[in-house]
Image (tube, rainbow, N blue to C red):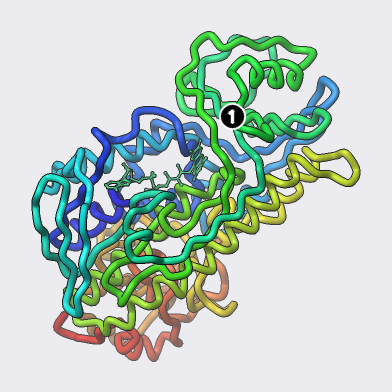
Amino acid sequence: MGLLSAYLARLCGLQVVIFDRSDGPLEVGRADALNARTLQLFEIAGLFGQLYPQGKPCNTSSVWANGGFVSRQSHWWESLEGCLHKHFLMLGQSFVEKLLDEKLSQLGCPVKRRTEITSLQLSETGCEVVTSAGETIAARYLIGADGSRSWVREHLEIPFSLVRPQIIWAVMDGVLETDFPKVPEIIVFQNETSDVAWIPREGNLDRFYVRFDSHDFTFEQALQKIEKAVQPHSIRFQKVVWFSQFSVKESVAAHYSVAHRAFLAGDACHVHSVNGGQGLNTGLADAFNLIWKLHWVINHGADPALLATYEGERKPVAQSVIESSGELVRATKFSEQGSHAQDYVKIVEKRAGNITGMGIGYGQGGLEGSRFHDFEFLHQGIGQLTRAYSCLSYTKFSLFLFGEVESEPMLPDCCQGIGLGQQTPEGLTSEYLGKAILVRPDGYIQAVAPLHQAQQLVARLPGNSLGA
Ligand SMILES: Cc1cc2nc3c(=O)[nH]c(=O)nc-3n(C[C@H](O)[C@H](O)[C@H](O)COP(=O)(O)OP(=O)(O)OC[C@H]3O[C@@H](n4cnc5c(N)ncnc54)[C@H](O)[C@@H]3O)c2cc1C
């Protein structure tokens, strides 16, 4: 999250210093799936094109029991509206980290590695940190994106009480040899419980999650559970790329910021089970939510109260992620009917809004605060077919006009106008037609007005400065 926050901040022209105690970006393991909303956000930030070809699309959850597939379902992906890529992109976290690390170097802001913060002081105007390299840095804002054991969170004494449901996942990435009818699907296996799941990965990799109730297990014990689950087929790891364990803990930080000077993002402010693949995706969305707000306060004169909406919007999302991943992980262990795997997939369906990322919104049910839909249209400015998400910019608001207007609204530089004239793009929700819609840099709807009142939406820009 730190890497993405720094990258987005650089896109917005902010000065950034980023410290990390590690030697370099992740090489293997950890998160394995980017959801559909993350793919849209990556498109806005110019990261999609390099990442997408490296991953493997996957939109199906299957149940395997008694030597055969019991069910295969993907309709909660296929029925997504206003979205081009209706699937997970199975791609290891290391690909994302490496790309961001490279981009930061290209943007003249390489990560200062093998460096920790040793002291942190906040004041009314900013913060000052001292690093393990002896540097003292003064900054207006600080983001603690330092993982689940966050030093920043501890130092700022932000409560983070953990629930530990005593569930441990063995995680194994490798290259398999098997006569199993292999498919690029997420497969949940029904044994006595559903303690084994098979996750397709990029390239020739595959991942298994195997559930245990304590930490002291071996690779062989995990493999035995897999062998039992895939019966009557046989399976062998030709190569093991990563073997680790993930102990499920659940928590949301009591606050996401102190005095709107120091912020937490990613695992530093929420942890939960890996089920549903929501950890990395939720953290990335934190960064997309926070950085444009800092940009608007620093560069466009927005009221610093805007920064309070970061916690207001993202904390309820983290709570819903804990509920959905928590329900999923417990279903692998407990089932009234003994049908854990089927129960699991039903929960995936029920919680699809979280899992796809497309059900996340910040409003009260109307258009305002909802995710802006993607659609294809003829862009009159460039004279070619394009998509809404190719036009969105992370450094600007966008004002879409869904119909003809008598006079074009006057917009400040920090807002681009995009008119559709008489076009009614295929699949576009009828709710947008005849309206002017102001879209935030992170692809959520800020405000809506009838077309003839489009100009009034300028007043809904934070900072509301025509010269900004
Ligand atoms: C086995 C496993 C499987 C997972 N599967 C998925 C999945 O399928 N999908 C998904 O979305 N998520 C998944 N996750 C979760 C995902 O990896 C995390 O949610 C994600 O890495 C959080 O990113 P982060 O930047 O907040 O924290 P981290 O990735 O933990 O990064 C924190 C960074 O801070 C640095 N740091 C920490 N302390 C300090 C300090 N004191 N000083 C300086 N630097 C410091 C660390 O070196 C690190 O680089 C999985 C995690 C694991 C372990």
Q: Extreme right residue here?
A: 337
- Along the line of sight, which residue is nearer the eye, 229 or 183? 229
Residue 292, x across and y down, in percent: 29, 67
Please say whether residue 385 is visible from this viewpoint: no
Residue 257 falls left or right of residue 317: left
Instruction: Kindly identify the residue that appears in the image at 63 percent across and 28 percent down.
Output: 198
Question: Crowding near pointer 1: few (<14 within 10 Å), some, many (20+)?
Answer: many
- Relative to 202, say whether 110 is above or below: below
- Place residue 15 in its image quadrant: bottom left
Residue 229, x across and y down, in percent: 75, 22
Q: Quadrant of the C terminus?
A: bottom left
- Along the line of sight, which residue is nearer the eye, 107 or 326? 326
Label 1 secondary element: strand
- Relative to 197, say whether 425 is above or below: below
Residue 96 falls left or right of residue 71: left
Instruction: Kindly identify the residue that appears in the image at 11 percent across and 59 percent down.
Output: 137
Please say whether residue 414 is visible from this viewpoint: yes
Residue 390, x across and y down, in percent: 34, 55
Residue for badge 1: 170
Q: Tally the numbered discs.
A: 1
Residue 218 falls left or right of residue 440: right
Q: Is mark 1 within 8 Å of ligand 1?
A: no
The type of residue carrying mark 1 is Ala
Residue 141 falls left or right of residue 29: left
Q: Quadrant of ligand 1?
A: top left
- Along the line of sight, which residue is nearer the eye, 454 or 44? 44
Instruction: Kindly identify the residue that appears in the image at 65 percent across and 33 percent down.
Output: 214
